[in-house]
Image (spheres, rainbow, N blue to C red):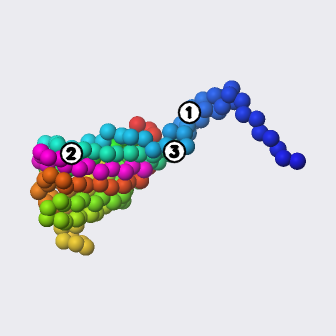
Amino acid sequence: MKTRFRHVAAEDAARSTNLGLAQQRRFSPGGDVVEYAATLEGTVSDPSGYDMICRFRRDNDSFEMWFVARFGASPSAGSGTWTLTLPFPLLATISADCPLGIWRAKRASPSTAAWGPIMRDTDSTITFEYPAAAPTGTPTYVGSAAPWAWTTSDSIGGYISAIIDRSV
């Protein structure tokens, strides 16, 4: 004999309320991929003239995010080191010194590529790091002139996986 389970809307509502009170409610049922309007920011002035495609998936206390920024016909790389805004605050005690993901940049002309770890900058931003002299060296950060002078059709993209700070 097979057991049959019944689903009652009132039970679902009560379960959802109790999970919410315990801060354990799922975000995006089923782990749906959601669009996010991430922005590149410069420490002195922000880059502009790029198209950003960014998606994330949240599952309770963690999230994954994929992004790519492509520079258009009239790009401005801004000034200073770049950071990228996040949809959720990071748990600083976990993410302070460990890579959260990986980035890859592609230069259109001459054809060149660079990559490195994505690191926590603040609770709400990440930065793109690479060693000054591969495979080791002083940490260098992607920005308006690094790893090259950005121009039309250049791109940077990546993936992160991080733990969310729910106390914020």
Is 48 left, or right, of 21 in this rendering? Answer: left
Q: Where is residue 75 in the image (x, y as percent from the top left)?
A: 13, 46
Q: For residue 132, which quarter of the picture?
A: bottom left
Q: Which residue is drawn at 28% across and 45% down?
A: 52
Q: Within 10 Å of the Cα at label 2, are there few (<14), some (14-19), or many (20+) other Cα atoms?
A: many
> Which of label 1 and label 2 is nearer to you?
2
Q: Can residue 138 be spotted in the picture? A: no
Which secondary structure lies at badge 3? loop
- Density class for disc 3 (Cα within 10 Å; few <14, some 14-19, many ≥20) is some
* Residue on which the image places disc 2: 50
Per the model, the C-alpha gap separating discs 1 and 2 is 38 Å
Residue at numbered disc 3: 31
**Of the image marks 3 and 2, the number of the one nearer the N terminus:** 3
- Helix, strand or loop at disc 1? helix
Q: For the residues marked 1 and 3, what is the alpha-carbon distance in whole angstroms?
A: 17 Å
Residue 6 appears left or right of 151: right
Decide whether residue 76 is among the magenta residues: yes
In which quadrant of the rendered view does residue 159 lie? bottom left
Q: Quadrant of the C terminus?
A: top left
Part of the protein shown in magenta: 64-79
Residue 98 magenta-highlighted: no
